Amino acid sequence: MTLSTPGSVRFDSVVKKFGNVTALKDLNLTIDPGKLVTLLGPSGCGKTTTLRLIAGLEMATAGAIHIGGEDVTHLTATYRKVSMVFQSYALFPHMTVRQNVAYGLTVKSMPKAEAAQKADHGLELVGLSGFGDRLPSELSGGQQQRVAVARAIVLEPEVLLLDEPLSNLDAKLRRHVREEIRQIQQRLGLTAVYVTHDQEEAMAVSDRIIVMKNAEIAQEGTPKDLYEAPQSAFIADFIGDANLAECHIDSISAGLATVRLDGQTYQVKDGALQTGAAKMVLRPHNLRLADATQPGIQGSVTYAAYLGKEIQYTVESAIGSLFVISGITERPFAQGDSVSVQFDANHARLVAV
Ligand SMILES: Nc1ncnc2c1ncn2[C@@H]1O[C@H](COP(=O)(O)OP(=O)(O)OP(=O)(O)O)[C@@H](O)[C@H]1O
């Protein structure tokens, strides 16, 4: 199949209001061709509105939207080269899988035989060759979602939009289908915009993640950027688990901050902050437990859970409650044990209070 050139997406100062509700404040974003970008954020932050604005299912109140370099701000959905995959699959139950995939093509007046041939090719691309004569009810949930993806990609969109495509699948299948969606997107070089509120799913499938909060972008970057260099307490907490410990930056020099935490001094990469109160981001697996006689932050284990691949602890300490993850090869501790919590300051980060 020849797919149309993957398109870029650009928002210039886009505002979207629904009556008194401002769903998007002043959104500026660029999505490069061939990349999968995820919109991630808590409920109501504006993810779905952004996706619907790309699709042309909503119109911007102000600002401009470009797809593939073309100004589409005032074009309705029919005239935009995008296809959407919904969380509900939205397959027609009485049509065969092939007819479902061919549906959008026949609506566009493609002759039936050609549409069926394209549908079969689409099914091949999503690993469902030979399933064309079945009814959707004769497929698993994951297979039905792949049919929905095939139906979207046979339309040869410049941009593929995916609205929480895994939310109807159970946890085990979700991981499998997200890998498949990512592989199809990469193999075909599609530009894809993916909405989810699940941060692990976002990290697993994305080239870049745009984290939204209160109708604005909170931070954007690769999964690694967001995890390793969060620019706020919100991002640190939202992307992966984080302990946020109150600390004090005494001085900053050559990109290193001298930080006081629990009476000790540490050198931490500065997060473009000023001296004064700050929060130190301590990832649970970067904390180690040692015997209480060892140096570190003193505390006591209030919860210990053996999870096979790791042990998770809650430690009440002088700097608050800490969530700690240890490898199973490390010495185990039990509830009630006095411990010393140690960490490597190279892995700590600083964010504003
Ligand atoms: N048609 C509408 N009419 C009025 N308000 C709306 C409409 N659609 C969305 N909103 C409001 O705009 C804001 C953003 O909604 P949106 O659906 O984009 O959020 P979301 O991040 O996708 O949330 P969720 O994860 O819950 O789906 C919310 O405050 C929502 O209530």
Image: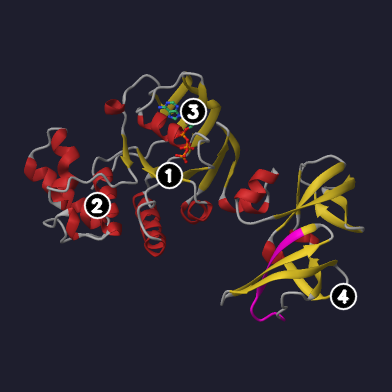
State yes or no: discs 1 and 4 in contact (Cβ < 8 Å).
no
Residue carrying label 2: 147
Q: Which of marks 3 and 1 is nearer the N terminus?
A: 3
Label number found at residue 194: 1
Residue carrying label 4: 294
Quadrant in the rendering for residue 285: bottom right
Measured in 3D between alpha carbons, the distance from the residue under mark 1 to the one under mark 4, in whole angstroms, is: 47 Å
Residue carrying label 3: 11
Amino acid under disc 3 = Phe
Measured in 3D between alpha carbons, the distance from the residue under mark 3 to the one under mark 1, in whole angstroms, is: 16 Å
Amino acid under disc 4 = Gln
Q: Is residue 57 above or below residue 7?
A: above
State yes or no: discs 3 and 2 in contact (Cβ < 8 Å).
no
Q: Is residue 139 above or below residue 32?
A: below
Q: Give the range drawn in magenta.
A: 321-331
Q: Could you tell me residue 7's position as x and y percent?
A: 39, 36
State yes or no: discs 3 and 1 in contact (Cβ < 8 Å).
no
Residue 4 within the magenta-colored segment of the rendering = no
Main SS type for the magenta part? Answer: strand
Q: Which of marks 1 and 2 is nearer the N terminus?
A: 2
